[in-house]
Image: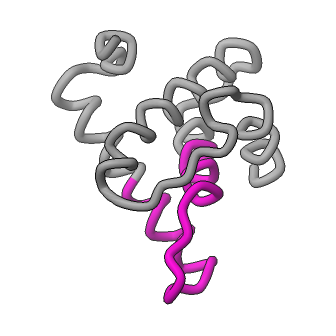
Amino acid sequence: MKKLAKELVKSSKKLKGLKLKDMASAEKSLPVVLEAVEAYSKVEPLPSDMKKELAAEVVNLLVDIPFMPESLEGVLIRRMMGVSIGVLNSLFGKNWLSKAD
């Protein structure tokens, strides 16, 4: 999944060079990550759990928490993505990303 995440970041104009440094950049960047994963999934269909995993891997590539080991950082990001997407799905339905445009 990490290799696929690297390819997605490299091939996406919006993701290339993007770094998540603070909450303001995260607020603007996370929808871009999710849109890129959804776009990829339209070309190469992925089940929802794989899309969450891919989104978490992309975010993990874009963020660096200097005082935290990479493995723990990945666990935290995957958990955060899963909870966030679950909340959005329950509040707005599974098509919330397309409604956000």
For the point 71% across and 40% down, which residue is it?
Answer: 9
* In the image, residue 84 above or below residue 8: below
Left or right side of 31 for 46: right
Report the front residue among 24 and 88: 24
Quick check: is 77 in the magenta stretch?
A: yes
The magenta-colored residue range is 53-80
For the point 50% across and 76% down, which residue is it?
Answer: 65
Report the front residue among 85 and 31: 31
Quick check: is 55 in the magenta stretch?
A: yes
Where is residue 59? Give x, y as percent: 55, 52
Report the front residue among 41 and 68: 68
* In the image, residue 101 above or below residue 14: above
Where's the C terminus, which quadrant?
A: top left
Judging from the image, the colouring scheme is one colour
Where is residue 67? Give x, y as percent: 50, 89
Main SS of residues in magenta: helix
For the point 38% across and 11% down, which residue is it?
Answer: 98
Examine the image and state in which quarter residue 11 appears.
top right
Where is residue 22? Give x, y as percent: 36, 60
* In the image, residue 80 above or below residue 24: below
Left or right side of 41 for 56: left
Marker count (numbered): 0
For the point 59% across and 85% down, which residue is it?
Answer: 69
Where is residue 26? Give x, y as percent: 38, 49
Report the front residue among 23 and 45: 23
Left or right side of 23 for 90: left
